[in-house]
Image (spheres, rainbow, N blue to C red):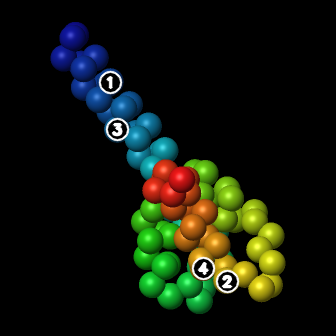
């Protein structure tokens, strides 16, 4: 019985992790248009994305005189704590 519960617990844990990680797939799809034209910054923006950077970069109303790529890049860097 204990072995069965251990296996069941591990399966539930794996399913929960997969479900939580799947949200990044939807984040990425949502950001495809916003990341167009960001050049080399696109790689950093994709792989460094977290919940907070997604919400800021997706909803930000960036003025036309500000480069979108640099805005999103520095917003994400600030959230990582690399900038003070």
Residue drawn where x is 24% and y is 20% of the image: 6
Label of residue 69 in the image: 4
Cα–Cα gap, marks 4 and 2: 6 Å
Determine whether label 4 and label 2 are within 8 Å by CB.
yes
Vertical arrangement, residue 12 with respect to residue 80, above or below: above
Residue 26 visible from this viewpoint: no
Mark 3 vs mark 4, foreground winner is 4
Dots 3, 4 in contact, CB < 8 A: no
- Label 3 close to label 1 by CB (< 8 Å): no
The residue tagged 2 is: 67
* Horizontal relation, residue 65 to residue 2: left or right: right
Which dot marks residue 46? none
Secondary element type, mark 1: helix
Name which quarter of the figure residue 62 lies in: bottom right
- Residue 9: x and y in percent read 32, 24
Residue 9 disc label: 1
| Structural distance between the alpha carbons of marks 1 and 2 | 48 Å
Q: According to the image, label 3 marks what residue?
A: 14
Does residue 34 sit above or below 7 in this rendering? below
* Label 4 residue SS: helix
- In front: 78, or 54? 78
Q: CA distance from mark 3 to mark 4?
A: 35 Å
Please say if 3 is above or below 58: above
Q: Which numbered disc flags the more N-terminal residue, 3 or 4?
A: 3
Disc with the residue nearer the chain's start (4 vs 1) = 1
Disc 2, SS: loop
Q: First in sequence: mark 2 or mark 3? A: 3
Tag 2–tag 3 contact (CB < 8 Å): no
């Amino acid at each position: 019985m204990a072995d069965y519960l251990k296996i069941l617990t591990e399966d539930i844990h794996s399913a929960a992790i997969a479900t939580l990680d799947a949200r990044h797939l939807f984040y990425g799809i949502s950001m495809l248009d916003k990341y167009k034209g960001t050049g080399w910054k696109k790689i950093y923006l994709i792989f460094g994305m977290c919940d907070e950077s997604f919400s800021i970069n997706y909803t930000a109303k960036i003025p036309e005189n500000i480069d979108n790529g640099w805005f999103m890049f520095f917003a994400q860097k600030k959230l990582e704590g690399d900038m003070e």
